[in-house]
Amino acid sequence: MTLTEIWDTFIQTIRETKWPEWVSTITQIASVWYARKNNVLVYPTGIIGVLLAAYVYFFMVSPPL
């Protein structure tokens, strides 16, 4: 596999990513940031991120072939 093919696959995967996956990732990153700062917002951002990730894993993942 060439570097160009790897790059094209990467870009295609980014384009196919749904909004709950993006929001979950961003809120989980924010949760880590707030944990580093010892801020109480670590809890709501962590809960939102985990709930969205669970939704993505259980309801948005296509079944195996």
Image (cartoon, helix red, strand yellow):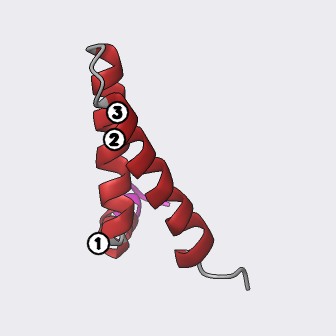
Q: Secondary structure at mark 1?
A: helix
Q: CA distance from mark 2 to mark 3?
A: 5 Å
| Residue linked to disc 2 | 45
Is most of the magenta stretch helix, strand or loop? helix
Query: Are circles 2 and 3 on residues that touch, CB within 8 Å?
Result: yes
Residue 42 locus on image (x, y percent):
34, 30
Q: Residue at x 36, y 66 (%)?
A: 20
Residue 15 badge = 1
Q: Secondary structure at mark 3?
A: helix
Image disc number at residue 35: none
Mark 1 → mark 2, Cα distance in angstroms: 25 Å
The residue wearing badge 3 is: 31
Amino acid type for the residue under numbered disc 3:
Ser
Badge 1 density bin: few <14, some 14–19, many ≥20, Cα 10 Å: few
Residue ranking furthest to the right: 65
Alpha-carbon span between mark 3 and mark 1: 25 Å
The answer to whether marks 3 and 1 mark residues whose Cβ atoms lie closer than 8 Å is: no
Boundaries of the magenta span: 1-6
Compare marks 3 and 1 and give the one earlier in the sequence: 1
Q: Quadrant of the C terminus?
A: bottom right
First reached walking from the N terminus: tag 1 or tag 2: 1
The mark lying in front, picked from 3 and 1, is: 3
* Amino acid type shown at disc 2: Thr
Residue 28 lies within the magenta run: no
Residue found at x 49% / y 49%: 50
Residue 40: name its quadrant: top left
Q: Quadrant of residue 44?
A: top left
Taking the spot 35% from the left edge, 72% from the top edge, the residue there is 18
| 30 or 43: nearer the viewer | 43
Image height check: is 27 above or below 54?
above
Residue 10 screen position, x and y as percent: 37, 61
Q: Nearer the viewer, residue 63 or 11?
A: 63
